[in-house]
Image (spheres, rainbow, N blue to C red):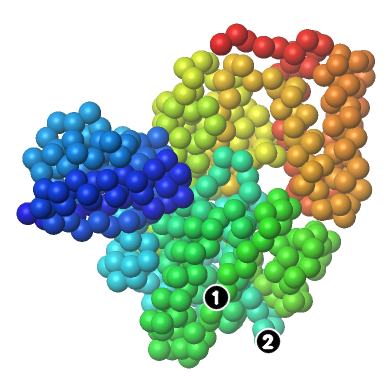
Amino acid sequence: MSVRLFVSRDAASLAVGADEVAQSLAAALRRRGIGFDLIRTGSRGLFWLEPLVEVETPAGRLGYGPLQPSDAEAVAVSILAGGAPHPSLLGLVDEIPYLKQQTRLVFDRSGKIDPLDLAAYRREGGYRGLAKALALDPAAVIETVTQSGLRGRGGAGFPAGIKWRTAAAAGGGQKYIVCNADEGDSGTFADRMLMEGDPFVLVEGMTIAGYAVGANKGYIYTRSEYPHAVATMNQAIARARAEGLLGPKVFDSTFAFDIEMRVGAGAYVCGEETALLDSIEGKRGQVRAKPPLPAVSGLFGKPTVINNVITLASVPWILANGAEAYRDFGYGRSRGTMPIQLAGNIRYPGLFEAAFGLTLGDLVEKIGGGTASGRPVRAVQVGGPLGAYFPPALFDTPFDYEAFAAKDGLIGHGGVVVFDDRVDMARQARFAMEFCAFESCGKCTPCRIGSTRGVEVMDRILQGENVEANLALIEELCETLRYGSLCALGGFTPYPVMSAIRHFRDDFMTPKRRFVAA
């Protein structure tokens, strides 16, 4: 008898003991003289079930989780008995409601295959998109991306096709594709999860972008806090190059394209595209004034397309299946799918990829299961540390760029962080100002000075000093930050501050900080 096992090697899985579980289960099977094939995969994104072990059966993969090394003996007995009852037996993984309800386009392979097995990637549909792209004129590739309705998944939601068309029209000579993988928003992990779980889809997407706009070099910029992702991406790039999928003759064509990793020190402002370019060039990461746009004059002064990981990873599916098929998913002007990351005080944390249009309430209550503490949800922050706080009264808001903008919010990179009724929203507002002050690159006055003054004013409010007057001052300061800052760091800081004041004003009115006993 021989069994085939799958265990995630995603950083989140490793953090809760996936290596130890894999080793213990392997040892338990050896002691029984049972042959096995242990495949280390990316994560499915069901983080509350990690470490998760999947066992291949004729009916599909059976799941066991979350496991401890001490479970190995009993799990081995269950596996050998064909899935005999065990407290951690989950049944068929594909039938777990959290996974079954998803629409997985970008993350379809994550958790299924060895992320560095190029043959497995191709068996699962990889490189069909690039093959179709190379059979088209570059302009036709750009038109396909444009017609798909793909918008930037890094937060701004700018149409990808327009950005590509601008770079393509910028004239001949050197051009670049830059992948913004500097994922710094609180509660987000989709970029890391994809780079660790399906790196070739990013390589393929960047290659298609290079062909479309006439670029022969790409850079992936990520942060030093992601060592597993950096190592996986470097190995994937090397394997793609060895197979002729990168280099001077991609797919034996006349098109040349290669990719290089660049690792930053983790400055939040380097998630802003022009600060990112300065960092790649070896400079201190500071925001550049626009115009010129990077698509016209970007990296080293050359036309540059900058997209984030999920945007570029969506491109192979679009080319392989067509613009119309992609556009069929979604809501309003938000087409396709979005990997939504559920985090904070939530019962089922993880990644949930779905078409735009689910309501915030469905995401938090039905899919996320409400709070992990069991207490009522009081606030949900969507869009990272600079995202607005939404109370349950706004849970009917569809997860969509325009719907969130209409409620003075933003979906950003798709991070959803949940707070229960013990949260002090005045202190959350103070934290937003403090975060901006700490992370500011210092180039523009509203962000550099305004955020520091904001912390001082918030401290006076927290002390109960002239609360109404200081709240009015905070509102004026937020207006200056929003319209006077050079980039979104200062420009978006008012979102969490003003939403906290608007929806949770009582927290600002009492000098004694509110506290709900556990």
The answer to whether one can see residue 436 in this image is: yes
Q: Nearer the viewer, residue 358 or 328?
A: 358
Q: Nearer the viewer, residue 150 or 202?
A: 202
The answer to whether one can see residue 94 in this image is: no
Q: What residue sits 82% from the left and 53% below the top?
A: 441
Going from N to C along the chain, the mark reached first, 2 or 1, is 2
Distance from Cα at disc 2 to Cα at disc 1: 18 Å
Residue under label 1, please give it: 259
Q: What residue sits 64% from the left and 20% below the top?
A: 423
Whole-percent x and y of residue 389?
65, 29
Q: Which mark is residue 504?
A: none
User: In the picture, residue 262 is in which quadrant?
Assistant: bottom right
Whole-percent x and y of residue 89?
22, 34
Q: What residue sits 67% from the left and 39% below the top?
A: 385
Whole-percent x and y of residue 274?
74, 62
The amino acid on which the numbered mark 1 sits, given as a three-letter code, is: Ile
Residue under label 2, please give it: 173
Q: Nearer the viewer, residue 512 or 123?
A: 512
User: In the picture, residue 244 is in which quadrant?
Assistant: bottom left
Outermost residue to the bottom: 254
The amino acid on which the numbered mark 2 sits, given as a three-letter code, is: Gly
Q: Residues within 10 Å of mark 2 (few under 14, many from 20)?
A: few
Give above or below for 234 relative to 11.
below
Q: What residue sits 75% from the left and 13% below the top?
A: 513
Q: Secondary structure at mark 2?
A: loop
